[in-house]
Image: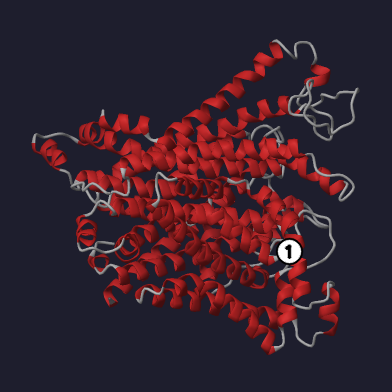
Amino acid sequence: MRRWRQVRRNPKIVTGVAILGLFVLVIVANPLLWATVWDGQERLYDPVIGFDHMIIHPSAPSGAHWLGTDSLGRDVTSMFTLAARSSVTVAVAAALVSGVVSLCLGSLAAYHRKWVDAVVTHTSDAMVLLPALLAVWVVGLGRPDASFGALQVGAVFGLVYGLGPATAAVRAAGLVVMARPFVEAARLVGAGGYWTMSRHLWPHLVPHAAVQAMIGVTGAIVAEAFLNFRSAVGGGIGFGYLVYEGLTWQEMLAGLRDIPWWVLLTGTLGITMLAAAFYLIGIGLREVFDPRGVRTRRRRVSAS
Amino acid sequence: MVTFLGRRLLWAAVTLVIYLTLVFFFVQWWVPIDFSSQFAIGGGQAEAAERLGLDRPLPVRYFEYMGSLLSGDLGDSLSGGSVGEMIAEAAPLTILVFAVGAVIAYVVGELLGRIAAWRRGTASGSFVSLLGVLSATVFPPFLVFVLVRYMRQPMVSLRNLLGLPSDSLAIWRESRVEQDEVLALLALALLGAVIGGLVVRAYAHRHRIRWLALAAFPVNLAAAIATLFAVGVGAEAIDLLYRVDYSTSIGSGSPVLVLLGVVLLSFGQVLFMMRVGIEDESDEYYVLSARAKGLSEREVRDVHVARNALIPTLAASFLALPTLLAGMVIVEFELEVHGLSTLFFEAVEVQDIPLMMGVLVVLGLLGVALRLATDLVIAHLDPRQRKAAV
């Protein structure tokens, strides 16, 4: 429980979780707003076809449109709350897939050594060379329908990232745990493979896999936003699409009028804040659990 | 050291073969749509598939591909030209920019990481950490937009300051040198500056000359540019780095902006790796005894802790490579610089599998080479690693 207290007191983890909480609120706000403020006003607030005839677009934030409207007259609040859902879906899918893959392969390699270890290590060494973004792009492009949406992007990203850097890191941490006396003791009393892994290896490796997953998720969010920005996959409304909307207006009317900052910043801040939340949790967990795993036990000398 | 080198080379070969196999089947299976239909010019789809060799079974194609790779042949692009030539044309700029950018990002990230670790808990330490988080999480197209929009004026002023005409065409019309030659000279000068910077910095660290360590990179880069002007290709070189064409598109095709983007996107990751490394090392007994000896805090940090923290930082930075590459690829693509990223995305858009494979092969080769170099540096820094199991 000492670790749990460290986790709760780590400012990075607390900040990250708080930002994530904000995003959950934003996602929940979408149906709530539809049920209350926007009830029956699809014509004005629909994220795809909404248009307000009363004002010139793009319009700056106002009472009727809290985050303003984009160049096509759509309400940015409505788009933003919808976009948050797909970005968070990507993040959760990528985190789960990469976490599970790296935990399974990493612990198997560390436990069995020999040929299992050789196969896992070489595969992960090879997968490290392949940027997950490129893999997602290869798979996703040419599937512009909804069959390759946020969930699929997250899964493919998580798979490539999980097989590569995450597995390498978890395996390294696993080797350190395997050298600890309690593993030897478990073996002496005749514990089998599954028992040793589930009782002794996994509890120590879960935080390490979590660190890798959180840091990987940062890349997944940016990747999905980028594909969304290029409208390469899905074609739905995401943070990347908001950034795109903000930028193309400037291109069309270069010099005549400044870009709609509220659209651009809503999109880009959405991406950065969500990615930063996971990144902060990741480096916070890394600080608490020391997953470099270079040393098994160290005598702590208090730093000044 | 020789057996160590041999083992690492063997490792590199095996890894490369596994990588190529994985990538080959990944691309063949997962590229959507039967892409032969796009190249069915004149004849039918079946004929196009036969002409492109797509009708034969996958394993046969796999062994053929690997065989031709061994002889250095990357095959032909589905749209005609030789993949090898297309890559040879696009790769130098990408590799140059990435190499120079990565080294600068590393130097910046390491310096800021030291500051963040040593001032943890203070306002300046938190600010540096915040910069690091922003660097690691900013949306690359937004960064590109900011760079293009706000670097334009300073860059144009810089060009005017150096006495360059504001029009790119005017420079090349009067110039007697080819663009390729200037690019080669520029690459040589920049790589020289970076290596020189690293050497001077190492020397300054060893002899504890603080100002020299900080000045090493700026001075070397300035010297490289000055050399280019002395040789007589200064104007052309600067123009290659930052073009002034009045296109209104988002990108403006300027390698120097790609370089800036790479540095800004990458230093954050290095910062946190260095910071974790330093914080771990600061708990060691040797730090206590260094303090007890009466060394100043700066000496404890720079001479004892930072040097030991370097090894895990280097090892960890390799695992961050795919993330760094992804940022680099997006920046290069968005700035419309003709490089490997642009080539790759064009290939993906028309589902040109040989070209796609070609770029991925080059990425793999570069990655393995980089990993070997990192391992050698680590082995040099830490003799224990030479004996450790591979």
Name the spot of residue B295 as percent of width and height, x first.
26, 64
Q: Residues within 10 Å of mark 1 (few under 14, many from 20)?
A: few
Given residues B69 and B289, the one toward you in this image is B289
Residue A242 in the image: above or below residue A133: above
Q: Residue at x 21, y 37 (%)?
A: A193
Q: Secondary structure at mark 1?
A: helix
Q: Decide if residue B50 is on the left or right side of residue B171.
A: left
Q: Residue at x 70, y 32 (%)?
A: A237
Given residues A198 and A45, the one toward you in this image is A45
State the image quarter where residue B14 is shown: bottom left
Say if residue B47 shows up in the picture. Answer: no
Q: Decide if residue A160 is on the left or right side of residue B258.
A: left
The residue at the far left in this view is A188
State the image quarter where residue B181 is shown: bottom right
Q: Residue at x 36, y 73 (%)?
A: B208
Name the spot of residue B184 as percent of width and height, x first.
64, 80
Say if residue B228 shows up in the picture. Answer: yes
Q: Residue at x 32, y 73 (%)?
A: B5
In the picture of the structure, the residue carrying the numbered disc 1 is B154
State the image quarter where residue B360 is shown: bottom right
Question: The C terminus of chain B appears in which quarter of the rendering?
Answer: bottom left
Q: Decide if residue A240 is on the left or right side of residue A43.
A: left
Residue A257 in the image: above or below residue B70: above
Q: Amino acid at mark 1?
A: Pro
The chain that hosts pointer 1 is B
